[in-house]
Structures are given as structure tokens and as C-alpha cells.
């Protein structure tokens, strides 16, 4: 079970780090300058044909 414990510890530490970095990157991407106009345009796509 030693190998299982080591692999689990490795996955816990690096998995949490990867998910945290992904979340921070997504937040930075969403709130970057100039993204509001792109988000507003994407929000209006379903209503273009009306």
C-alpha cells in the first residue's frame, strides 16, 4: 500500500494545484479588459434572428 499512498499524495497535491491555477486563469480570462463587449455579443446570439 506504500505505492498507493505515495501516488494518492502526489495526485492530491498536484491535482489541487492544477485546479487552482485553472480557476485563477479562468477568472483572469473572464475579467480581462475588453471582454465585456465580447460577452455581450455572445449573449445576444440567440436573439439575432428575432
Image (cartoon, rainbow, N blue to C red):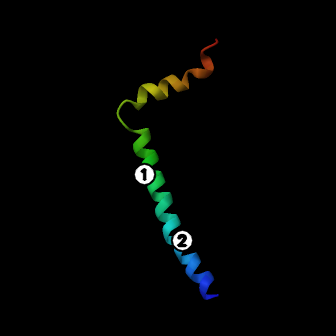
Front residue of 37 and 11? 11
Q: Quadrant of the C terminus?
A: top right
Q: Which sits earlier in the primary sequence, circle 2 or circle 1? A: 2
Front residue of 12 and 43? 12
Q: Is residue 3 left or right of residue 30?
A: right
Number of the label disc, if any, that sits on residue 24: 1
Residue 26 position, x and y percent, is: 46, 46
Number of the label disc, if any, that sits on residue 14: none
What residue sits 53% from the left and 26% below the top?
Answer: 42
Q: Residue furthest bottom?
A: 2
Mark 1 secondary-structure assignment: helix
**Tag 2 residue:** 12
What residue sits 54% from the left and 26% below the top?
Answer: 43
What residue sits 42% from the left and 41% below the top?
Answer: 29
Location of residue 7 (image quadrant): bottom right
Residue 9 position, x and y percent, is: 54, 77
Q: CA distance from mark 2 to mark 1?
A: 18 Å
Residue 11 position, x and y percent, is: 55, 71
Amino acid at each position: 500500500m506504500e505505492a498507493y499512498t505515495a501516488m494518492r499524495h502526489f495526485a492530491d497535491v498536484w491535482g489541487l494545484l492544477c485546479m487552482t491555477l485553472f480557476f485563477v486563469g479562468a477568472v483572469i480570462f473572464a475579467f480581462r479588459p475588453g471582454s465585456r463587449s465580447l460577452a455581450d455579443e455572445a449573449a445576444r446570439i440567440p436573439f439575432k434572428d428575432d
